[in-house]
Image (spheres, coloured by chain):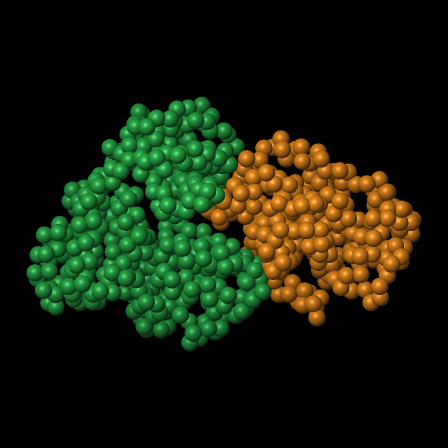
Chain colours: A green, B orange
Amino acid sequence: MRAIIKNGIGVFHPQGFLDGDAAESMLSIDDIKATENSEASMILVSLKKVIFFNKNGLETFVRMLKKVHKSNNAIVGFCDYDIKKFNSIINFFQNELSFSLFKTYEIASLFAQNYDKQNKNVLVYSDDKSQRAAMAIELHNNGHNPIIAQSKAEFKEKSAKKDTYDMIIEDSYIGQMDSNISSRVTGNAIIYTLSSYLDADTTNKFNIAYHTNSLKIGFRLFIFECYTVKSMNIHALNFFSKIATYAAEYNATICFVGMTYEKTPIKFKETLEDCGIMFFERLDDILEDKELLHELGASKAVAGKDKKGLNKALVSELPKYIDATVATINMMTNAKATKESAQIQTIDIKDKDDKLASSIGFYGDLEGMIMLAFPKKIAKKACEVLIGEETDDIELILDALAEFVNIIGGKVKSLLSNENIKVKITLPRTYENVDELLEVAQDKKGVQVDLSFEDDKFLFFLTR
Amino acid sequence: MITKEQIDSFIQRIPPAPKVLQETINLLDNGELTKAAKTASQDVAFNAYIQNLVNKPAYGLQHQVSDTSQIFSLLGIPKCKQIIYSYILTLLSPEKWSLFELDFIKFKELQANISGKWNLILEHLKIVDKSVQSSISLLPASLIVADALFKERIDDVKLLKETKNLDYNTILKRICGIDIFDLCEEISKKWGMDENVGEIIQSASGVKKSEKKDIEYLGKWMHLLLFYEFSKPVFIEAGLNDFIDFQIDFVDEIYEDFMMVINGATK
C-alpha cells in the first residue's frame, strides 16, 4: 500500500479489519522506503475505512511512521476517527504516544507545512493544558488564528456558534517530535518558520533539496518568519548569506520578518542586507501589500540563472516524455493523442485565453521540466476520471490537473528507470493562466511539441 | 482505456452453464435432490470439486464424505445450488491472474470461505431462500471480470490508483460507466439465476440503495463479509483489499452481530 501524497501530505488508507497480520500485509519494505523518500512533510494513516483495529495492527503502522519521522522529520500520525477509536488509541499507547492524532484530515492539514490555506479561525480544545498550548503554537506558526477553550464548558459554549470558526479541533493530539524548519506556501511565496537559536544546526534542519526545487519550479519569494527566534550566530549568518547568493542567481528575493536584535548583533542584519536579504517587521507588511508582493517577485516568476536550455541527454530521452504524456491521455480518456509537430525553440503559446497549464520538474541523473498548456475544456476532459463528476470549479480542475501531470511524472520516472536513469520528481505546479507559465519558461530553449487530441490541440514543452 | 465494446465482448465470451450442471440446477429447483445428485455425478470434475470443497473446515462436516449423493443430501438443495454456481465460476477463472495475485488454490479457498460464512450468516438470519444462498457465488465472479478487464493496462491502472485513492471498481465505473456489480448482474442473467440475485449483489456494493429493506439488509452482511475476508493477509497481498470501496457507515449497525456469528464460526 502506498501513501497518496497531495499538498505535501501523504495519507495511507487501510480499509476493513486491521489486526497485526493484516497490517503487516498492507505495508511492504518498498512501501516504507517510498514513504521515506517522498519528501512529504506530513504522513498520516487514515482510519476512516477501518471498522476494527487492535494494538498490533496499529503498531505496524506506528513503526513505519516512526521510521519515516526519523529519516525526514515529517509530522506523523493517524487521522479520520471517531471518539471511540480515539479513546482506544489513547488507551493502547498511553505514555508511549509519540505520534499525532488528528480527528479529521482537514484538521491535520492545518498543522502541515506547505499548506496553502491560512488565516483560519480555529477553536481548540483538549483536556490536557500542554496539548492546548502546543496546538495553539503550531497553528499560530502555520499562519492561523487559534482560539483556545480553557474548559469543556467553555468549549461547548463556543463550539455551539459554529459559524464563528472555520474549524473546530477536539479529540486530537500533537505528538512530541523534533521540529524541522517548517515551510508553507502562500500564493507564490514560500514561508519558512524559524525559531529559538539559529546556529550550525540550522543548516541540518533546513531542507535544501526542497528549497532548490522550489527555485527551479519558479518560486521567487522566500520569507523567513523569525518571530520566535532568540538569537543568531555566525554559522547561521554564513548559511543565510549562502542562501541569499543562491537566490540571487535565480533572481529570487529573500525576506526576514519579525527579527529582533537583543541577542543578535545588529551588524548581522547589515551583512545580510548586503547579501540582498530584506527585513520587515511583520509578515502582513509583505502579504497585504499587493504592489510590494509583485515587486518582490511573488506574482511573477522570472527565470534568472536557470537558462540552461536543452542538452543532448535530455533530448535523447524526449520520446519517453512524449510517450508518457500520450499514454496518460490515452489511459485517462480512451482517446488517442497524436504528435503533430516538434521543434526546438523558446515556448510559444499562440492563443493565451481560457487556457490552464501545469508543470512538473525532475532531477537526479537527468534534470528537466515538463510543461503542459491546455484549453480549459480539454484540461477538464483529460482529468475527467480524476474529477469524477461534471464541474466548473476551477480549483477542482487545477487540483486534478496537478494529479494528471503527477501521473505523467510518475510514468517518466518509471520509463527512465527501465534504462537505469534514476530521477526524482518535484511537486506538480499548476497555472490558472498561461502568462504565469510563460514567466517561468521565458527565454528557455526547449522542445515544443504540439499534440492533438480529439480535434483539439494542446502543448507539451520540455526544458531544463 | 477499456471500451464498452471490450466489456460486451467479454460478457459474450462467458460460457453458459454446462449442460449437465444446468440440468442439475433445474432438478434442484424442482426439489429432486436424488435425481440431481445422480445427474451431477456424470461430471467427474465437478464431483472432485464438491468433495474437496465440502471436506474443508469451513463446511464443518464431522466425517469425510466422498459420495456425491451423500454430499447432496447432507447439504440440502440451497447449498448444493450454491456450490454448482461456485464450480461454474472456477471454470471461468483464468489460469493466470494479472491484477490480483491469486491462483487456483487461493481462489478456491476464497470461494469456500465466503460461501461457508455466508451459510452461517443465513442460518443466523434464519433465511432459507435458495436464490439468496446462491447469490454469494457471484462475488468471486466480479474478481474474474475485473482481472480480465484490466489485464491489458495493469500498470496504468495501478499508477492511477497510486495517484488518487480510488478503488479498482471506481476506476472502472468512471472510465466505462459500468461497474463490477453491474457485470455480475449481467452474468447472473446469463446463467438464468433469479432476479433478486442481481439486486442483492448490487446492494452489497454498499453504494446502490435497494428500495427493498430485506435486500438492503442482506447487502450489508455481504458487504461486511467481503471486507472480513479481504482483510486476511493472503487476500490483502493478492490485492483484493483495494478492490472495492469499504462503506463503514453502511455496515455499522450489523457489526457486532456479524462478529458474533463469525467468532462462533472460528471457535
**Numbered-mark total:** 0
User: Measured from the top left, where is residue A264 in percent x and y?
Assistant: 12, 65
Asked if residue B167 lies left or right of residue A372, the reply is right
Q: Is residue A412 above or below residue A117?
A: above
The picture quadrant where one finds residue A395 is top left
Asked if residue B119 lies left or right of residue B24, the reply is left
The picture quadrant where one finds residue A79 is bottom left
Answer yes or no: is residue A84 visible: no
Query: Looking at the image, which residue sits at the far bottom?
Result: A95
Q: Residue at x 67, y 43 (%)?
A: B184
Q: Residue at x 25, y 60 (%)?
A: A203
User: Measured from the top left, where is residue A361 in percent x and y?
Assistant: 35, 42
User: Measured from the top left, where is residue B171 in percent x and y?
Assistant: 54, 42
Q: Residue at x 36, y 43 (%)?
A: A366
The picture quadrant where one finds residue B65 is bottom right
Q: Quadrant of the C terminus of chain A?
A: top left
In this rendered view, identify the residue nearer to me: B152 or B22: B152
Asked if residue A144 lies left or right of residue B200, the reply is left
Asked if residue B74 lies left or right of residue A216, the reply is right
In this rendered view, identify the residue nearer to me: A94 or A408: A408
Q: Is residue A189 above or below residue A82?
A: above
